[in-house]
Image (cartoon, rainbow, N blue to C red):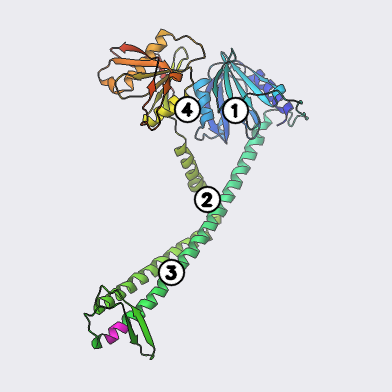
C-alpha cells in the first residue's frame, strides 16, 4: 500500500464511516479488526502494521476471530465511542489518525512504532509498547499511482494473500510432520534392532547355562562364567554376582521375553508411522489438528487478566481475576494516573479506574470502584468494609513479594456499607 492508497482509504472511510460507533475490536488474520456500527457500505476497518495496510471491510465473516494481543486489549480498554474523522499524517510517513469524541488513535503503518491513543490535550492515554515519539520525515515519502481504483478491492486482495499464506503454512506443517515421521520411523527401527540383538545374546546365554547347569553348583554366585558351546567355542557370560547361577539363568529367560515384547511393540509402531507417512498428503485434518493445536497454544498464551466494566457515562473499570492477574493489571496495564482500589484488610482483586491525565475524580465513579473492590474481595459476604484508593503511580511491589502483594502511599480510605453491584455497570468481558 502506497501513500496515495492510504489517502484513498482515509477519504473513503471519512465518507462512509464518519459518525459510526466502535462496536468491537478483534484480532484476525494477524491484524486488528475494528467493527463499526452505523457506517455506510462497510462493516469494519482492518489494519495490519506488519503488512503496512489499513483497509475497509464489507464482510467480517471472512475475518475469523483469533486470540487477542496487547494491542486489541489496549484499544478495547481505552478507545470507544463515535468516530469523528480519519486523516493521514504524511509528514510522519504512512500514519493514520482516527479521531473519536474525546480521543485520537495513531496507527503507524510500518514497523518499529506502536499504536498510541491520546486525549485532545495531547496527553498519552495508552501505548501498545513503550512510547516511541513519531518524528517528522527528513524527506517526504515517494508516492506512486493508486493500486486500485476502488478501495474496496483491498479486502479481496488481502484475503487472497492471507489465504495463500495459510496454504504455505499448511505445506510447511506437512513437510515438518513428514520429517518428524521419518525420524520417528528410523528411531523405532533402531530400537527394534537393539531388542533383536539383545534377544539373541540373552537366548545364547540362557541356553548355555541351562545345558551346563547339571555340572555346576546351581547356588554358586560369581561375576561371570566361561562355558563351551556345542560348536566347541568357549563363551564368557557376564552374570549378576548378587544372584545364583540358576537365578541368572531365569533372569536371562525373563530378558528374552522382554526383548521379544519390545520387538513386537516396535514393529507395530513402525507400521503405524509408515501408514501415517503414506497418507500424509491426504491429511485434511491438518487444519483441525496442527493448526488448531497452534491456535490453542496461542490462546493459552493470551490471557486477559481482568474483568472489564463500563459505566453509563463511559467510565471504564478493570478488575483483576486472581493474584497474578492483579500484578499484571496494576503494573503492566494500568497507567500511572489511573486510580487503584483495594478492599482494606481483606484478600481481593485490584480494581483500576481508567482516568485521563489531570482529570478530577467524580464522586459517583469513586463509589462505583469502591463497590467493585468490596464485591471482588472476601468482604463481599458482609457487604461492607473500608476501601483504599490512590493513584497507580503510588503503588509498588517489593522484590520477592507474593503475587498480588503490594505496598502503596498517599492512600485514602472510604467506608462502604450495603454494597451491591451498581446497576449502571455493563460487563464487557469476551
Residue 305 vs 274, above or below: the answer is above
Which of these two is toward me, 377 or 244?
244
- Label 1 SS: loop
Which residue corresponds to mark 3?
192
Say what secondary structure mark 4 lies in.
helix
Judged from the image, the secondary structure of the residue bearing numbered disc 2 is: helix
Categorize mark 3 by other alpha carbons within 10 Å: few (<14), some (14-19), many (20+).
Answer: many
Query: Which of the marked residues, 1 or 3, is nearer the chain's N terminus?
Result: 1
Q: Write the residue at 33% across / 84% down.
A: 226
3D distance between C-alphas at marks 2 and 4: 41 Å
> In the drawing, what numbered circle is on residue 284?
2
Relative vertical location of residue 220 with respect to residue 378 in this rendering, above or below = below
Quarter of the rendering containing residue 366? top left
- Upstream in sequence: badge 2 or badge 1: 1
Rounded to the nearest angstrom, the CA distance separating label 3 from label 4 is 53 Å
Check residue 332 in the rendering and tell me which mark sits there, or answer none. Answer: 4
Question: In screen coordinates, is 112 left or right of 286?
Answer: right
Name the N-terminal-most of marks 2 and 4. Answer: 2
Asked if the magenta segment contains residue 210, the reply would be: yes
x and y percentages locating residue 272 in the rendered image:
45, 62
Q: Quadrant of residue 415?
A: top left
Toward the viewer: 221 or 331?
221
The CA distance from mark 2 to mark 1 is: 38 Å
Please name the residue that numbered disc 1 is placed on.
Answer: 114
Q: Is residue 426 visible?
A: yes
Outermost residue, bottom side: 232
Q: Label 3 near label 1: C-beta < 8 Å? A: no
Q: Residues within 10 Å of mark 1 (few under 14, many from 20)?
A: many
Amino acid at each position: 500500500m502506497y501513500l496515495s492508497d492510504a489517502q484513498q482509504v482515509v477519504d473513503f472511510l471519512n465518507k462512509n464511516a464518519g459518525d459510526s460507533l466502535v462496536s468491537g475490536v478483534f484480532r484476525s488474520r494477524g491484524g486488528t479488526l475494528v467493527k463499526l456500527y452505523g457506517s455506510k457500505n462497510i462493516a469494519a476497518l482492518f489494519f495490519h502494521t506488519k503488512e503496512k495496510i489499513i483497509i475497509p471491510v464489507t464482510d467480517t465473516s471472512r475475518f475469523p476471530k483469533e486470540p487477542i494481543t496487547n494491542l486489541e486489549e489496549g484499544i478495547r480498554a481505552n478507545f470507544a465511542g463515535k468516530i469523528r474523522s480519519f486523516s493521514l499524517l504524511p509528514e510522519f510517513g504512512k500514519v493514520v489518525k482516527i479521531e473519536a469524541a474525546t480521543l485520537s488513535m495513531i496507527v503507524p503503518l510500518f514497523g518499529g512504532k506502536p499504536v498510541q491513543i491520546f486525549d485532545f490535550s495531547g496527553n498519552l492515554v495508552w501505548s501498545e509498547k513503550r512510547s516511541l515519539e513519531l518524528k517528522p520525515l527528513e524527506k517526504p515519502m515517494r508516492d506512486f499511482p493508486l493500486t486500485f481504483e476502488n478501495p474496496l478491492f483491498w479486502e479481496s486482495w488481502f484475503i487472497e494473500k492471507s489465504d495463500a499464506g495459510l496454504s504455505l503454512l499448511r505445506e510447511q506443517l506437512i513437510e515438518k510432520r513428514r520429517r518428524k515421521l521419518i525420524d520417528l520411523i528410523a528411531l523405532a527401527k533402531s530400537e527394534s534392532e537393539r531388542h533383536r540383538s539383545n534377544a539373541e545374546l540373552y537366548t545364547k546365554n540362557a541356553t548355555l547355562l541351562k545345558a551346563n547347569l547339571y555340572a555346576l553348583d546351581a547356588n554358586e554366585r560369581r561375576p561371570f562364567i566361561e562355558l563351551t558351546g556345542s560348536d566347541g567355542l568357549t563363551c564368557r557370560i557376564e552374570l549378576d554376582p548378587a544372584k545364583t547361577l540358576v537365578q541368572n539363568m531365569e533372569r536371562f529367560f525373563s530378558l528374552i521375553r522382554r526383548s521379544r515384547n519390545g520387538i513386537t511393540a516396535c514393529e507395530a509402531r513402525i507400521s503405524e508411522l509408515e501408514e501415517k507417512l503414506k497418507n500424509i498428503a491426504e491429511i485434511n485434518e491438518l487444519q483441525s489438528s496442527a493448526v488448531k493445536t497452534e491456535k490453542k497454544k496461542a490462546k493459552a498464551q493470551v490471557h486477559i487478566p481482568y474483568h472489564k466494566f463500563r459505566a453509563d457515562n463511559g467510565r471504564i473499570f478493570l478488575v483483576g481475576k486472581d493474584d497474578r492477574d492483579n500484578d499484571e493489571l496494576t503494573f503492566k496495564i494500568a497507567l500511572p494516573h489511573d486510580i487503584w482500589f483495594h478492599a482494606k484488610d481483606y484478600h481481593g482483586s485490584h480494581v483500576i479506574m481508567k482516568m485521563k491525565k489531570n482529570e478530577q475524580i467524580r464522586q459517583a465513579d469513586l463509589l462505583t470502584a469502591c463497590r467493585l473492590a468490596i464485591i471482588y474481595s472476601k468482604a463481599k459476604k458482609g457487604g461492607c468494609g473500608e476501601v483504599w484508593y490512590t493513584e497507580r503511580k503510588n503503588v509498588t511491589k517489593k522484590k520477592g513479594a507474593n503475587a498480588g502483594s503490594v505496598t502503596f502511599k498517599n492512600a485514602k480510605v472510604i467506608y462502604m456499607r450495603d454494597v451491591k453491584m451498581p446497576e449502571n455497570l455493563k460487563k464487557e468481558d469476551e
